[in-house]
């Protein structure tokens, strides 16, 4: 499904250029659940942003279902991202003045979905995260765990091929974290491809494969028994 070859990301610093990612190779199969671990500054969020087409590598090749995404730009890139990729962030990224349903419908505003189809998708997504009874509730009234459920529902509303999650349980209490991880596990069991970035070994264990980044490279030292190194 996804092939990264020799992906490098450099950013300017006081000494010239800093290598945030160094010659990263990665293959992700359809239906896989991949956890990426690493300390702060290891490059894991940068890698997730590149996978999500929110950032561009300095060099290397990125194939998404056979499409060379580095050749996409402007509207074609935005349409590809909106239809193929869903995002879940640690900070929820919701619009406080909107209701639950209005928030999860935002990605569909950039598609040609009619009102009937939008309603169908919204109800399906809310049922999948257990929040159909909160559809009309302002998100500002929700708990942290409920807000993250709304964010997950929004991420799957366009039925994307790939779901990316950046520390999705980082702002949640223990009970809410378990609830959110069960939802991700259920989505994966239904065939959704998921890549999750986390620093928490307990959270990473939900993945079927675990990779560790250190200083912009795949680490040859396993974080724990389940870790595999690819590349």
Image: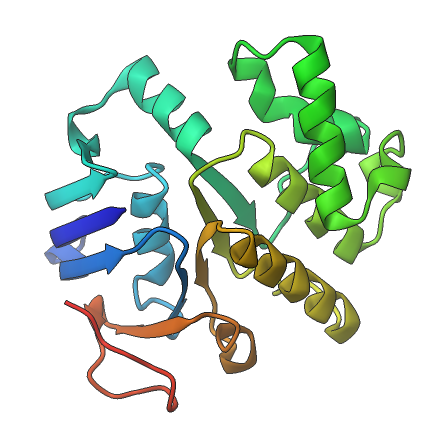
x and y percentages locating residue 121 in the rendered image: 67, 27
Question: Residue at (22%, 23%) from the top-left corner?
Answer: 72
Q: Is residue 79 left or right of residue 55?
A: right
Question: Residue at (39%, 59%) from the top-left corner?
Answer: 32
Question: Residue at (74%, 20%) from the top-left corner?
Answer: 119
Q: Is residue 68 left or right of residue 87?
A: left
- Residue at the far bottom in the pictured view: 225
**Colour approach in the figure:** rainbow
Number of on-image labels: 0
Q: Is residue 92 left or right of residue 54?
A: right
Residue 138: quarter of image: top right
x and y percentages locating residue 69 in the rendered image: 21, 32
- Residue at the far front in the pictured view: 190
- In the picture, the quarter occupied by the C terminus is bottom left
Question: Residue at (76%, 57%) from the top-left corner?
Answer: 145
- Establish if 82 lies above or below 175: above
């Amino acid at each position: 499904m996804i092939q990264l070859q020799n992906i490098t990301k450099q950013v300017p610093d006081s000494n010239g250029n800093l290598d945030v990612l160094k010659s990263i190779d990665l293959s992700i199969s359809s239906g896989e659940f991949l956890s990426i671990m690493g300390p702060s500054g290891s490059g894991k969020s940068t890698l997730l942003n590149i996978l999500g087409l929110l950032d561009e590598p300095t060099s290397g090749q990125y194939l998404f279902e056979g499409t060379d995404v580095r050749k996409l730009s402007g509207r074609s890139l935005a349409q590809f991202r909106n239809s193929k990729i869903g995002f879940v962030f640690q900070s929820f990224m919701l619009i406080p003045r909107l209701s639950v349903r209005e928030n999860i419908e935002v990605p569909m505003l950039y598609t040609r979905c009619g009102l009937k189809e939008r309603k169908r998708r919204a109800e399906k997504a809310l049922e999948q995260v257990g929040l159909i009874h909160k559809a009309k509730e302002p998100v500002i009234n929700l708990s942290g765990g409920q807000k993250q459920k709304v964010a997950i529902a929004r991420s799957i509303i366009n039925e994307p091929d790939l779901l990316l999650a950046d520390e999705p349980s980082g702002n949640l209490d223990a009970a809410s974290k378990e609830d959110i991880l069960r939802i991700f596990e259920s989505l994966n069991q239904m065939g959704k491809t998921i890549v999750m970035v986390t620093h928490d070994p307990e959270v990473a264990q939900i993945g079927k494969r675990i990779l560790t980044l250190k200083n912009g490279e795949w680490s040859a030292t396993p974080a724990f028994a389940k870790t595999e190194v690819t590349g």
